[in-house]
Image: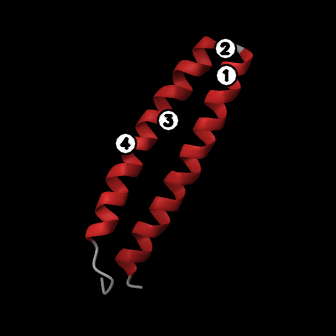
Amino acid sequence: MGPMRTLTVAIDWILIILFVISIILLIYALVKKNKKMAKYAGIAAAIIFILLFIAMRFALTVKPGQ
């Protein structure tokens, strides 16, 4: 894999891990009925999901040799 491909794969994995953490925090906040934490965890999950979608779309455009 080229350096560009390696970088996009690393960024994708980091965003996936952050997305999972934000979902876990969102579930925790909803179970504990903490509205403020649930709001922020929901916003974080939405932003990370959008970034993950953009990063994966970009990763699909990178050619294997790059």
Q: Contact, CB < 8 Å: mark 4 with mark 2?
A: no
Note whether 26 is above or below 49 in the view shown.
above
The amino acid type found where label 3 is placed reads: Ala
State the residue position of label 4: 50
Residue 20 locus on image (x, y percent): 60, 45
* Crowd class of label 2 (few under 14; some 14 to 19; many from 20; radius 10 Å): few
Residue extending farthest right: 32
State the residue position of label 3: 45
Residue 14 locus on image (x, y percent): 53, 57
Indicate the quadrant where residue 2 lies: bottom left
State the residue position of label 2: 34
Mark closer to the chain start, 1 or 4: 1
The numbered disc on residue 29 is: 1
Mark closer to the chain start, 2 or 1: 1
Quadrant that contains the N terminus = bottom left
Q: Contact, CB < 8 Å: mark 2 with mark 1?
A: yes
* Crowd class of label 3 (few under 14; some 14 to 19; many from 20; radius 10 Å): many
